[in-house]
Amino acid sequence: MTSLLLTFAAHPRRYPTYLAYINGFTYGFSLNILTLLVPLHAIDLGFRLSDQGIIVAAPAVFMVALRLPGGAIADRFGERIIMWFGFGSLIICAVVAANAATLGLLILAQLFNGASRSVYWSAGQSYASRSADGGSGRVLGRLLACESTGGICGAVVAGFVAQAAGFGTAFVVGGFAAAAGFLVIAVLPTLPRRDQVRSIMASFAPIKTMMFKRSLTFAYLVSFMAAVNAGLVGGLFIAFFRDLGYSEGETGVIRSLNSVGVASLALFFGWLLTRLGPRNMGILGMISTGAVSVAIAYTGSVQLAAVPLMALTGVTFGCLRALYPTLASDNSTPGQRALTLSVVSLYWAVAMLLSPLIFGFIADATSIRFAISLYGVFAVAVGLVSPLVYRFSQTTAAEQ
């Protein structure tokens, strides 16, 4: 192991998969700092839950609009240019948010956050899976573990820096973290494509077919349900813990536990997928995520319950978060890998737009506890009917 690390340090470009993992850690760290800080700042400024729902949903505007162009550009010109754009957008987000005291500026900062997220994930997942083609479940699981580990560190840093030095300083830290991503991308080698498209229009050509491809139907559902949970954990759950009296630092730690669970699951995702299969993995992820969310709604005021449950919801969410890109990768060619991932994750973007808005207004009209509980019941119900979607997604030999 020591010899491998020394060889990697001396010649990192020989190991593109390892560099993809480092890149994922860096992105997860910088993204989670900013993703946590913006809703915390909105709470500190006294905005209503419905306003906070708008702030959390704002990134999804660009996540929907830029998702497919990002995938097509990555397939035509390579993933690195898209990853450059992803880190650059986070830097702009940090600069705007550091000076934001109004709803409009916070929404503007979130739009740049969404521009980054809209394109980075598909490009990063495409690069990692192509660097070790044939082992997408294992590689994408480890990539998610690295991204989540970075997210753990970012959430903890964000909460405590905001509490100790203020939100302005915390946003500056997030901006510098995103700038570090440029250094990693500069080392990433360009991966060759045997069937690379020759024009940008050719990259867009398969979109219509992919949007409603039968073999990807289950991937669409898993992507959508994973994003519904992510949208609430990144917004309503944060407001819930602050409403219960947790400080910014404590909220950051509790939020990071979700990433701890994701990272733990991701390390063993390939092994679990082999044994459970995608159908059972998806069903388990949806039903268990809903059930744990209801448990958090009614026991969140007790730290001894909140801590393990937030970690557990990360594990259950991780089943979905790692599954949908794996399904997309396994149902695509290397030359259309980024675009396929973008199409599948477009359903994620739509859910990220809808879930914070819908459940934010429900929380305003009722209570945060009721809104989280309602989501939990919804997730369980979808999980129970998901075997029908999986059966529908099984394509015939003719379609393949």
Image (tube, rainbow, N blue to C red):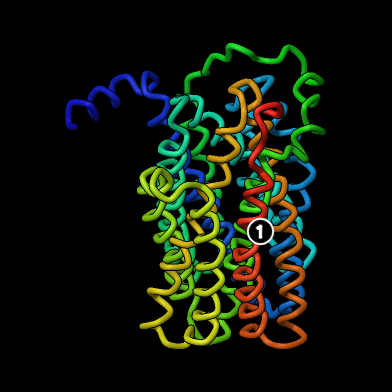
Q: Residue 391: give x, y in percent of width and height.
A: 64, 48
Q: Residue 223: give x, y in percent of width and height.
A: 63, 51
The residue drawn where x is 62% and y is 68% is 379
Q: Can residue 123 be seen in this view?
A: yes
Label 1 crowd (10 A; few <14 / some 14-19 / many >=20): many
Q: Is residue 87 visible?
A: no
Specify whether 249 is left or right of 45.
left
Specify whether 163 is left or right of 390.
left
Residue where numbered disc 1 is placed: 97
The residue drawn where x is 61% and y is 45% is 91
Q: Which of 189 and 212 is in front in this view?
A: 212
The residue drawn where x is 51% and y is 47% is 278
Q: In which quarter of the image is residue 305?
A: bottom left
- Indicate the secondary structure of the residue bearing disc 1: helix
Residue with the most extreme front position: 397
Q: Quadrant of the N terminus?
A: top left
Q: In which quarter of the image is residue 375?
A: bottom right
Q: In which quarter of the image is the C terminus?
A: top right
Q: Is residue 363 above or below residue 29?
A: below
